[in-house]
Image: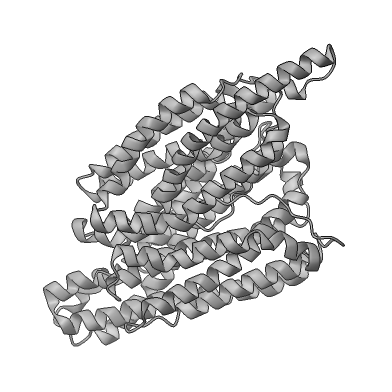
Amino acid sequence: MNLRMDLAQLSRIHAHQPDGPVAKTGGDSTKSGNESNVSVARMGIASNVALVALATGQFLVGLDMSVMSVALPSIQKEFGVGMAQMEWAMMAYMVAGAALAVPAGALGDRTGRRRLYVIGTSIFVVGSAISALSPDMGVLIFGRAIQGIGSGFMGTLALAMLTSAVGRDQIPKLIGLWTAVTSGASAFGPIIGGAMVQFLGWRWMFGVNVFLMAAVIPLVIREVPKDTPDESEKRRVDWLGSSLLTVAMILVAGGLSMLETSKYYEPIVYVPVIAGFIVLLIMVMQQRHSLIKLTNWASVKVAPIPATLTISVLLSMVLAGAMMQQMLLVQNVLGFTPMMAGITSFGASLMLVVFAPISPKMMGRIGLGPTTCIGLGTVALGLFGLHLTSATTGMVQIVFWFGIMGVGIGIGMPAVSAGAMMAIPQDQMGTISGFMALISSISAVLGIAVISAISAVRVTSVWLVEGAHIPGYESLTDEVVSGAIPEILQTNGQDAATAASLSYTVGVTTALMIAAVGVAIAAIVALFMLGSRGKTSKSIELPVMLEPEKL
């Protein structure tokens, strides 16, 4: 499940306006008008078919993000891997996609969006095939990275192609259809994926991409109008800046992931983290002197963008990390099936879809600060409820707290996105929002590493006490940290499994409690930092785009 808002998609509504016949003026108005009507009609027919093809691709991109956390216990049992490898099975996809969040749009403008989308889709298919056939965890992580590269192109270019292929008067209808499709994918993705993992096996979660995308690619080639590349200087891509940021993210996340088996003061942990910050500093220096930059840094500094960006970073970190740990907890400790695990997160996705349209109305009445505060406060309440999970907690209770969290995200994130977009000049929406989407993806990667690290430290400390009476308990520490409770039950018996369950539960719930406190503090800060921005005498409904991929 991915509960983040896609700022890049929202920006495409404004940034990619069509230059087709409907936008032209002058000349023979009658002739031009007739030609425009015919052209738009044809584009409308094509775009309906193209919408199905592109939405199918977007659904699969989101599904492969959301279902991975549900599938991890099954993958863990087959390959017998630890937490660090499972983290990278999640993060490899995110890192690769995040690395292309900014350059994909500009590269598509320079080389042709349709052409690049087809290339990206083909890469996604190759990565899916590698993942489905992977004989071990290393190959699976590699396949996930290849998938992520393809998804980076697909997610960035899909809506841009659709909106640029129709007339201005058709864009609102098109966006409404796209929102409905992506919202539905966000809501039902976890259940579909959970059922697939349970009844067909986790490999089919990737294998189905190969067959469905084999139908999508020909449809895109046939139905999406070919666009003319723009080779102007303003479309150049800052590959160096993107590469430096990606390397920094990999180093920091990689170092933190080592906390599963190492202490924070050991070189294997702190050396990559320090190296990551050094690379980040190099990127900052490069951006100061580069003619081609990742984004317009001056505009990013305009209020309330720094505050909204900080909130987005925090939420992305918390949600990505909490979701992975909670899915492992409910399956490995509480004994939920993958289908049941998908159902537990359905409440959050459903509430997001229901409450997201309400958020702009609330902001219009009470302002950005209070709306964001209410949203974040509700998220914190949901996280607090999830932290009460124990070995005897039932499914209904978990569904309820996930639903509360979804209500908060549905209220808070659209307001945060809208607050940022209102401060961005229209001619810079694509660049800046793409950068903000990149930061959101990076935050999700770091969130998985940070939340897992907090949990691992706590699990280890509890296990060394609770498991002290188990013969050879120290050798089981890595398995306990990874939540491999069913395996411990089979190899070491009920006493060891009970102690391991308690230790792992305490670790995960402690991490969730810390996350809840952090979000609650952010809610209070947002109330004062964001103030009454966006408050109007009449409620203004702002377009909100939901991204189905990522938690």
Direction from residue 136 to residue 45 in the image, left or right: right
Instruction: Return the residue nearer the eye: 100 or 17.
Output: 17
Residue at left 51%, top 25%? 223
Question: Would residue 264 be seen by someone viewing this image from the given angle?
Answer: no
Direction from residue 81 to residue 69 in the image, left or right: right
Residue at left 71%, top 39%? 14
Q: How is the image coloured?
A: one colour
Give the quadrant of the N terminus: bottom left
Direction from residue 116 to residue 147 in the image, left or right: left
Give the vertical position of 376 relative to 193 (above or below): below
Quarter-of-image position of residue 109: top right
State how many labels appear.
0
Give the vertical position of 216 relative to 86 (above or below): above
Instruction: Return the residue nearer the eye: 11 or 354.
Output: 354
Give x and y (percent) for residue 330: 34, 72
Quarter-of-image position of residue 497: bottom left
Give x and y (percent) for residue 94: 45, 49
Instruction: Return the residue nearer the eye: 230 or 250.
Output: 230
Residue at left 34%, top 80%? 461
Give x and y (percent) for residue 254: 40, 55
Question: Would residue 212 be seen by someone viewing this image from the given angle?
Answer: yes
Give x and y (percent) for residue 158: 54, 36
Give the vertical position of 96 relative to 450 (above or below): above
Quarter-of-image position of residue 307: bottom right
Residue at left 45%, top 43%? 96
